[in-house]
Amino acid sequence: MTSPAERLTAKLEQLPISDDASICSLLRTTLLGLLAITGALEERLTRLEATIQPSPTP
């Protein structure tokens, strides 16, 4: 299974824009940064959910 960052990078590489184009570089950097932030937030949310969920009673 590919990660969202890998899928996004593959899509960006398919754009008919030169890799040297500043807009392409800016877009790639911005989107990958947002994916990193999203991943970190998702990880923290998962830990928080595990903390606040009541433990099952036997």
Image: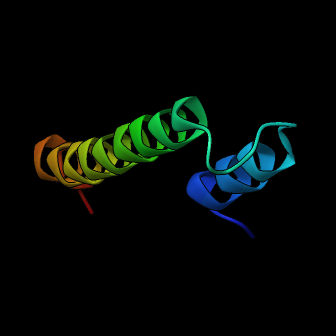
Q: Nearer the viewer, residue 8 or 19?
A: 19
Total marks in image:
0
Residue 25: image location, x then y, percent: 51, 43
The answer to whether 31 appears left or right of 39 in the picture is right
Instruction: Identify which residue is drawn at 87% across, 37% down.
Output: 16
Q: Quadrant of residue 33?
A: top left
Q: Residue 54 location, x and y as percent? A: 18, 45
Horizontal relation, residue 30 to residue 11: left or right:
left
The x and y percentages for residue 11 are 79, 45
Left or right: residue 21 compared with residue 41: right
Side (left or right) of 23 relative to 34: right
Q: Nearer the viewer, residue 54 or 43?
A: 43
- Quadrant location of residue 48? top left
Image point (42%, 44%), residue name: 29
Q: Position of residue 9 (x, y in %)?
A: 66, 54
Who's the residue at 33% across and 45% down the image? 42
Q: Quadrant of the C terminus?
A: bottom left
Quadrant showing the N terminus? bottom right
Q: Residue at x 37, y 37 (%)?
A: 34
Q: How is the image coloured?
A: rainbow
Residue 46 vs residue 32, the one in the foreground = 32
Residue closest to the far front = 20
Q: Is residue 16 above or below residue 36?
A: above
Q: Nearer the viewer, residue 36 or 20?
A: 20
